[in-house]
Image (cartoon, grey):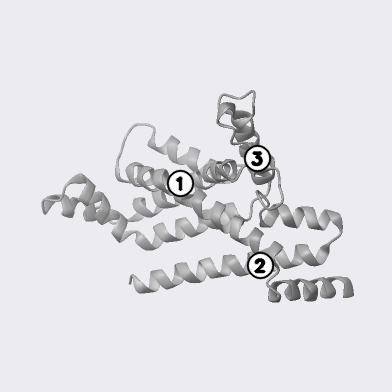
């Protein structure tokens, strides 16, 4: 117990002292995860809206597929992206392996099915008269789609927050395609795994506390936006 309490205390001191190593890892983690969520959302939100607002053969199967992909293992994503970006892979010429860009790509793949499924669920449960009314009033299909998103804005924002939570806490894909390179691709989760394996419990605990604080800050920001949009 003393070992645990001492580790927590040392971790808090590291945070309070503005340790450059810890804060550098925090900045990289935030930058990579936010970029991944934005990249995923650019495709996931329109796709979720498209599937949810239209009836077509195979829709139920497609919904099942996206719900199944919610449990997509991070190591599988990491393995696939690694194969694509390795020197013998089809995208090896881009030389993205073991770079932040590779981590962003892997995390975007992880966030994509989650955001899509949540947006789809939100749009499906929305009153179908929203889009119909907008079209009746002379709106274009794009404007009607925007009206639907505006009505589902709380759920869409929650989907983005969930996507962020999914990617910032994953370790498998990040370490496989990023390599855990100090000052370059080392994120919260990969650093925690490394420091704990080295026996530096305080450093690992400091990063863990920082990760929880960052997740709390994102959720508070999401809640604040939801309250402002009421």
Q: CA gap, disc 3 to disc 1?
A: 19 Å
**Marked residue nearer the N-terminal end (1 or 2):** 1
Tell me the residue at 70%/43% (across/down).
179
Mark 2 surroundings within 10 Å by alpha-carbon count, few (fewer than 14), some (14 through 19), many (20 or more): some
Tell me the residue at 38%/63% (across/down).
154
The numbered mark at residue 210 is: 2
- Asked if residue 123 lies left or right of residue 1, the reply is left
Residue that mark 3 sits on: 98
Q: Position of residue 120 (x, y in %)?
A: 40, 48
State the residue lying farthest toward the right. Answer: 2
In front of the other: 200 or 124: 200
Q: Where is residue 127 in the image (x, y as percent from the top left)?
A: 28, 56
**Marked residue nearer the N-terminal end (3 or 2):** 3
Which is more foreground, mark 3 or mark 1? 3
- Asked if residue 44 lies left or right of residue 218, the reply is left
Q: Is residue 90 above or below residue 99?
A: above
Mark 3 surroundings within 10 Å by alpha-carbon count, few (fewer than 14), some (14 through 19), many (20 or more): many
- Residues tagged 3 and 2 counted as in contact (Cβ below 8 A): no
Mark 1 surroundings within 10 Å by alpha-carbon count, few (fewer than 14), some (14 through 19), many (20 or more): some
Q: Where is residue 103 in the image (x, y as percent from the top left)?
A: 59, 44
Look at the image and tell me in which quarter the N terminus lies: bottom right
Residue that mark 1 sits on: 39
Q: In this view, does 12 lie above or below 119?
A: below
Q: Where is residue 159 in the image (x, y as percent from the top left)?
A: 46, 56
**Marked residue nearer the N-terminal end (3 or 1):** 1
């Amino acid at each position: 117990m003393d070992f645990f309490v001492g580790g927590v205390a040392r971790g808090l001191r590291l945070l309070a002292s503005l340790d450059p190593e810890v804060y550098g890892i925090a900045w990289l983690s935030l930058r990579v995860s936010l970029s991944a969520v934005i990249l995923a959302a650019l495709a996931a939100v329109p796709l979720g809206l498209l599937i949810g607002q239209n009836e077509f053969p195979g829709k139920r199967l497609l919904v099942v597929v996206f719900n199944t992909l919610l449990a997509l293992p991070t190591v599988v994503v990491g393995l696939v992206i690694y194969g694509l970006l390795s020197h013998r892979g089809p995208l090896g010429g881009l030389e993205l392996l073991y770079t932040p860009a590779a981590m962003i790509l892997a995390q975007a793949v992880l966030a994509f099915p989650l955001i899509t499924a949540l947006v789809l669920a939100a749009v499906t449960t929305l009153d179908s008269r929203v889009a119909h009314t907008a079209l009746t009033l002379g709106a274009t299909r794009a404007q009607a789609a925007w009206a639907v998103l505006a009505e589902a804005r709380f759920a869409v924002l929650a989907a983005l927050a969930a996507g962020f939570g999914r990617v910032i806490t994953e370790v498998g894909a990040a370490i496989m395609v990023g390599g855990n390179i100090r000052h370059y691709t080392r994120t919260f989760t990969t650093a925690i795994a490394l420091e704990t394996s080295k026996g530096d419990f305080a450093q690992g605990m400091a990063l863990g506390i920082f990760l929880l604080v960052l997740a709390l800050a994102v959720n508070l920001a999401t809640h604040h936006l939801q309250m402002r949009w009421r």
